[in-house]
């Protein structure tokens, strides 16, 4: 598919050093270029298996409009790309041919036989990827592992590289078009750089001749399976200047864990992103490709829905609700008082599966929730929401059963659901952009909220984006609803009116939020830019903590490892702290403690504690290291702890105990199919 528009071990190898090479055309600014199309739409060329290229107009409002098809050719069309002036279209097929088409007359201009410049030819040679460069060079990647550079004017081969050990699936280039990246089924991402060589002595009779060459620079193998796609991204979000802080050098026994990619990921600087069959997304520095480790964008690709409630009616124990694709699991979680708490072993908890609730007809569950009592469950699939009650029996084989309760008829399926603190009401954020408040005991619809930006617009039909997150305060007065773009609506559940609207902050989405047990008028959120905001709901303003510190957080928190995915408040009315966590690390923030400006260590420094529950044999050594390392930071705010494996959920069982759910990535990778290319030693 091509568009025309206006204007987990890491293996590194490097043959040519990127440092020290300076080209005149190494500027990554995208130069303006002409394109022979209208400015209010794009043209889309689609490669099809029936041997046709189909052309569409892509409008911003009306979607795709079919124009016409190019003449059908034998075989399947696997790749397509436009020339830079949008006058030519190039297509690659499964018979080893590249065809050049006139985008105006729809006639074939010429064709290239790819196999002559690679490792073979014939009907089994597939041209998987094509890339057109501004200098007029056409790049192809095929099933023989060859990356070839062609003169697009004459269709002649300029260069061929065969460093891949499997099919070349994707190609990408930087905005200045002087670097080309290729990725294939061998898991490699390879960089080629343009180099201009001069031939001849250069006198009045024989002027110097410039020859363009593409030089192999090096590769990175971060993926364990086939790399299917490459793309170039340029960060456009706001970038805050980091405060100048003195970072003391501290001797440490082990090499610190390096999570930070802020050394190369900056505003306007292009980054390469790769995606593979191992479900991984990696980001690379496009300018300094072999100088930095790739950044794992999403350690846990599928973010599970996990909810933990405390002090339930089940003897005061905690209940954990885990949402899967077609069922819900309810676990009873107890603290074992006979075992001392351990950072490493995690043996001081007892979990028991109480019940498993399967969706009707194996329909995919969209959202779910559990009441504070631990006895009411609710979920929604793509048809309708459902409500259930967990019951305990004294006798019989099964001590637990799940009974279905009635909900008012006509409720739409939901994007998000939440119970009130006393479990008497269920709030349902429907796909029709309304929020329905249901009385659980009477099975009646009590009220319907229509989120609006202005309170005076309550009588207008729903026009705001869908609600994807909801939180209730501990006193049952406030309901915070957040849409998919990060706008926040605060509703008063006592008088059933919208209280406040908070527009998205710095154009960032909301990743987590909640009301602390200590104060029901305080609402805390984190955003996709890893900022923390504290709101005073009653006063309709930023809280005092945010007004003083939100834009001056310590440097180590601004470089938080990964995107924040959750918050956990200690279940104590006297606590002023919160645990902020991502899939890579967690951080303790105490709103009642001052922020020490001298604490400027990076998160990969000595104050980043390593959490690992996988090796019981190393429990004593890890406890010893934990005590030694944490003692200097005992009273420090913004304490960090790194995770060894991707963490799915962090929640407080008590004021001094945390429940951490992790998933070893190797266990996930074992369920994948074997990669297409597997290197055999000695061959």
Image (tube, rainbow, N blue to C red):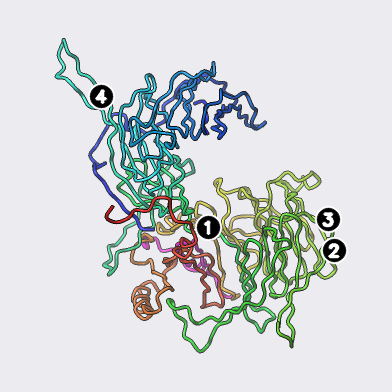
Inter-mark Cα distance, 3 to 4: 71 Å
Inter-mark Cα distance, 4 to 1: 54 Å
> Residue 421's image quarter?
bottom right
Examine the rendered structure and indicate whether residue 59 appears above or below residue 678.
above
Inter-mark Cα distance, 3 to 1: 38 Å
Examine the rendered structure and indicate whether residue 177 appears above or below residue 481.
above
- Which residue in the protein does label 1 denote? 532
Question: In this rendering, would 150 be left or right of 457?
Answer: left
Pick the residue in front: 209 or 498. 209
- Which residue in the protein does label 3 denote? 410
Pick the residue in front: 461 or 284. 284
Q: Residues within 10 Å of mark 2 (few under 14, many from 20)?
A: some
* Of labels 2 and 1, the one closer to you: 2
Query: At numbered mark 1, what does the secondary structure look like: helix, strand or loop?
Result: strand
Q: Residues within 10 Å of mark 4 (few under 14, many from 20)?
A: few
* Of labels 4 and 2, the one closer to you: 4
Q: Indicate which disc, 3 or 1, sits on the residue closer to the N terminus.
A: 3
- Which residue in the protein does label 4 denote? 211
C-beta proximity under 8 Å, tags 4 and 1: no
> Residue 357's image quarter?
bottom right
Can you give x and y, in whole percent of width and height, for residue 652 in the image?
A: 55, 73
Q: Which residues are magenta?
A: 574-600
Query: At numbered mark 4, what does the secondary structure look like: helix, strand or loop?
Result: strand
Query: At numbered mark 3, what does the secondary structure look like: helix, strand or loop?
Result: loop
Q: Indicate which disc, 3 or 2, sits on the residue closer to the N terminus.
A: 3
Can you give x and y, in whole percent of width and height, for residue 310 in the image?
A: 63, 76
Q: Indicate which disc, 3 or 4, sits on the residue closer to the N terminus.
A: 4
Pick the residue in front: 13 or 59. 13
- Which residue in the protein does label 2 denote? 444
Q: Indicate which disc, 4 or 1, sits on the residue closer to the N terminus.
A: 4
* Of labels 4 and 1, the one closer to you: 4
Q: Indicate which disc, 4 or 2, sits on the residue closer to the N terminus.
A: 4
């Amino acid at each position: 598919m091509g568009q025309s528009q206006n204007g987990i071990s890491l293996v590194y190898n490097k043959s040519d050093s990127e440092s020290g090479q300076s080209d005149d055309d190494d500027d990554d600014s995208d130069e303006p270029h002409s394109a022979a199309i209208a400015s209010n739409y794009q043209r889309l060329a689609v490669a099809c298996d029936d041997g046709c290229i189909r052309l569409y107009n892509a409008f911003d409002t009306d979607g795709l409009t079919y124009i016409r098809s190019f003449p059908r050719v034998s075989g399947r069309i696997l790749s397509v790309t436009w020339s830079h002036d949008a006058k030519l279209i190039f297509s690659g097929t499964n018979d080893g041919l590249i065809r050049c088409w006139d985008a105006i007359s729809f006639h074939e201009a010429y064709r290239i036989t790819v196999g002559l410049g690679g490792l073979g030819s014939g009907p089994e040679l597939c041209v998987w990827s094509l890339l057109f460069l501004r200098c007029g060079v056409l790049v192809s990647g095929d099933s023989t592992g060859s990356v070839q550079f062609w003169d697009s004017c004459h269709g002649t081969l300029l260069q061929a590289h065969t460093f891949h050990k499997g099919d070349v699936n994707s190609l990408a280039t930087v905005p200045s078009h002087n670097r080309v990246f290729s990725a294939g089924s061998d898991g490699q991402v390879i960089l080629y750089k343009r180099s201009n060589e001069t031939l001849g002595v250069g006198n009045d009779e024989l002027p110097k001749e410039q020859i363009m060459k593409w030089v192999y620079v090096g590769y990175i193998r971060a993926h364990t399976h086939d790399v299917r796609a490459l793309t170039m991204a340029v960060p456009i979000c706001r970038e805050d200047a980091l405060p100048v802080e003195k970072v003391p050098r501290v001797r440490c026994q082990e090499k610190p864990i390096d999570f930070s990619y802020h050394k190369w990921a900056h505003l306007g600087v292009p980054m390469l992103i790769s995606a593979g069959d191992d479900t991984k997304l990696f980001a690379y520095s496009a300018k300094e490709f072999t100088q930095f480790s790739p950044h794992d964008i999403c350690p846990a690709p599928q973010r599970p829905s996990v909810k933990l409630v405390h002090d339930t009616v089940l003897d005061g124990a905690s209940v954990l609700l885990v949402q899967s694709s077609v069922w819900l699991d309810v676990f009873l979680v107890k603290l074992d008082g006979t075992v001392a708490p351990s950072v490493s072993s995690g043996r001081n908890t007892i979990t028991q599966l109480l019940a498993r609730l399967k969706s009707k007809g194996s329909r995919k569950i969209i959202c779910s929730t559990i009441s504070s009592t631990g006895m009411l469950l609710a979920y929604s699939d793509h048809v309708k929401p459902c409500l259930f009650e967990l019951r305990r029996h004294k006798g019989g084989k099964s001590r637990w059963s799940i009974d279905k309760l009635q909900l008012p008829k006509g409720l739409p399926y939901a994007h998000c659901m939440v119970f009130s603190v006393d479990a008497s009401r269920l709030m349902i954020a429907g796909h029709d952009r309304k929020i329905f408040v249901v009385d659980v005991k009477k099975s009646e619809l009590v009220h319907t909220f229509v989120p609006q930006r202005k309170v005076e617009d309550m009588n207008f039909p729903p026009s705001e984006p869908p609600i994807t997150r909801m939180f209730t305060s501990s006193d049952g007065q406030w309901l915070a609803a957040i849409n998919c773009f990060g706008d926040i609506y605060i509703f008063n559940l006592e008088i059933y009116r919208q209280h406040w609207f908070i527009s998205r902050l710095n154009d960032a989405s909301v990743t987590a939020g909640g009301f602390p047990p200590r104060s029901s008028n305080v609402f805390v959120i984190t955003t996709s830019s890893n900022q923390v905001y504290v709101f005073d709901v009653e006063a309709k303003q930023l809280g005092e903590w945010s007004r003083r510190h939100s834009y001056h957080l310590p440097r180590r928190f601004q470089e938080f490892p990964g995107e924040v995915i959750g918050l956990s408040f200690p279940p104590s009315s006297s606590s002023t702290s919160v645990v902020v966590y991502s899939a890579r690390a967690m951080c303790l923030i105490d709103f009642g403690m001052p922020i020490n400006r001298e604490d400027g260590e990076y998160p990969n420094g000595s104050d980043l504690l390593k959490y690992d529950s996988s090796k019981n044999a190393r429990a004593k050594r890890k406890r010893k290291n934990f005590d030694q390392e944490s003692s200097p930071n005992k009273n420090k705010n913004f304490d960090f702890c790194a995770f060894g494996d991707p963490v799915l959920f962090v929640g407080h069982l008590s004021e001094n105990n945390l429940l951490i759910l992790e998933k070893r990535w190797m266990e996930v990778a074992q369920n994948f199919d074997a990669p297409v290319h597997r290197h055999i030693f000695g061959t």
